[in-house]
Image (cartoon, coloured by chain):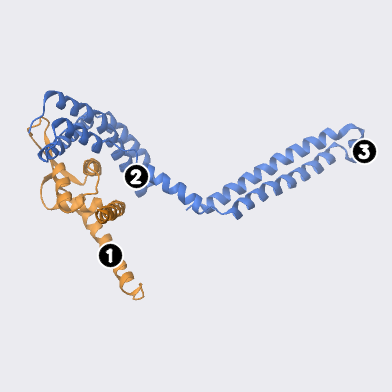
Chain colours: A orange, B blue
Amino acid sequence: MVTNDNEQHKEGGLLNNLSEMLKGVLDGIVLEIISRGEIYGYEIARKLRAMGFDGIAEATVYALLLRFEKNRWVRVTKRPSEMGPPRKFYTLNEKGMEELRNFWARWNFLSDRLNKLRNDGGASG
Amino acid sequence: MSFSRETTEKIRAFAREQSRHYLEQAEMTYLENLRRKSSRTKSRVLAKLAKFKSRSETAVEAENDLVLYMSDYMNDLMAEGLSEEEAFERAKNDLQYRSDTEKSADLRERISSYYETLDPAVYEAIGLFYAGFLFFGGTVGALAGLAAGGGRGAFLAGGWIDTLIGVADGGAIGIGFGLISHAVITLKRKP
């Protein structure tokens, strides 16, 4: 029982740290998910959970999508829903694709430098 | 899965209230992004923001989006075994706008960075600048007042008021120089 508690505590700590790290890359993750095909808001949250990103706050995707719309990174198609208001389906437009390309370029740069740091202390420059 | 009329009304009321906060957050982040790109865009963005705020259609859309988002989440929770009421309470708690936004996190980071980089030597230097300029200004002012008042003879005969005015003026000029030095140091230390 004590072991389980410790494991849960460790996992909780890991997820807390993970959500801090994710703040900087969540835009890219969601842009990538949208780039794979038309999708609606809550479906993105489901995908993130299925990928193991349980620590992300429930409202995060909703807030991100509002910002994506403001930034004009997405194309929105409205379709009737069973709940009454029309449901929005998102795809990336050219500006969103460019943002996604920029994200991966930043990611590759960071990942490359971090790997070098881990492997040889960054000595290979 | 559809909800009872009462729950549907509660979802709608929650979404109406909370979507405003999320929308404001999205607007602010958008504004900050544009500011970062160019300071010249400020007036353009403010005009755009005013226009955006006045478009009730955007607010209604944000509200509808949250209604659907919350309903989907509640359906998932109910599929896991929660009752409608429990699912609503849980969704309400999880989707509630938190003030711990990027803005406040950024502010906390800046305050913590300010205290981390606080250098006592800088504040000592600022204090010395004030004191130095105050003494310097006071002395120059006193000498100028003494000279303008007619020298030592006039001072002893009751002309000390000119010297006093000179000291006060010099002191004010000294404080002025101290403030300018403080501003220069602050600007130099600005990250």
Say if residue A125 shows up in the picture: no
Q: Nearer the viewer, residue B118 or B160?
A: B118
Question: Dot 2 lies on which element?
Answer: helix
Q: Quadrant of the N terminus of chain B?
A: top left
Name which residue lies at 92% across and 38% down: B153
Q: Nearer the viewer, residue B6 or B190?
A: B6
Which mark is nearer the camera, 3 or 2? 2
Q: Position of residue B138 (x, y in %)?
A: 76, 43
Mark 1 to mark 2: distance in Å? Answer: 24 Å
Question: The residue under label 3 is which amino acid type?
Answer: Gly
Read off the chain for label 3. Answer: B
Q: Position of residue A114 (x, y in %)?
A: 31, 66
Read off the chain for label 2. Answer: B
Q: Which residue is mark 2?
A: B102
Q: Are marks 3 and 1 on the same chain?
A: no
Q: Which residue is mark 1?
A: A111
Mark 1 is surrounded, within 10 Å at the Cα level, by few (under 14), some (14 to 19) or many (20 or more) other residues, namely few
Q: Which numbered dot is residue B70?
A: none
Name which residue lies at 29% across and 34% down: B21
Question: The residue under label 2 is which amino acid type?
Answer: Glu
Q: Could you tell which of marks 3 and 2 lies nearer the N-terminus?
A: 2
Q: Position of residue B71 (x, y in %)?
A: 14, 34
Question: Dot 1 lies on which element?
Answer: helix
Within the image, what quadrant is residue B3 found in? top left
Which mark is nearer the camera, 3 or 1? 1
Question: The residue under label 1 is which amino acid type?
Answer: Ser
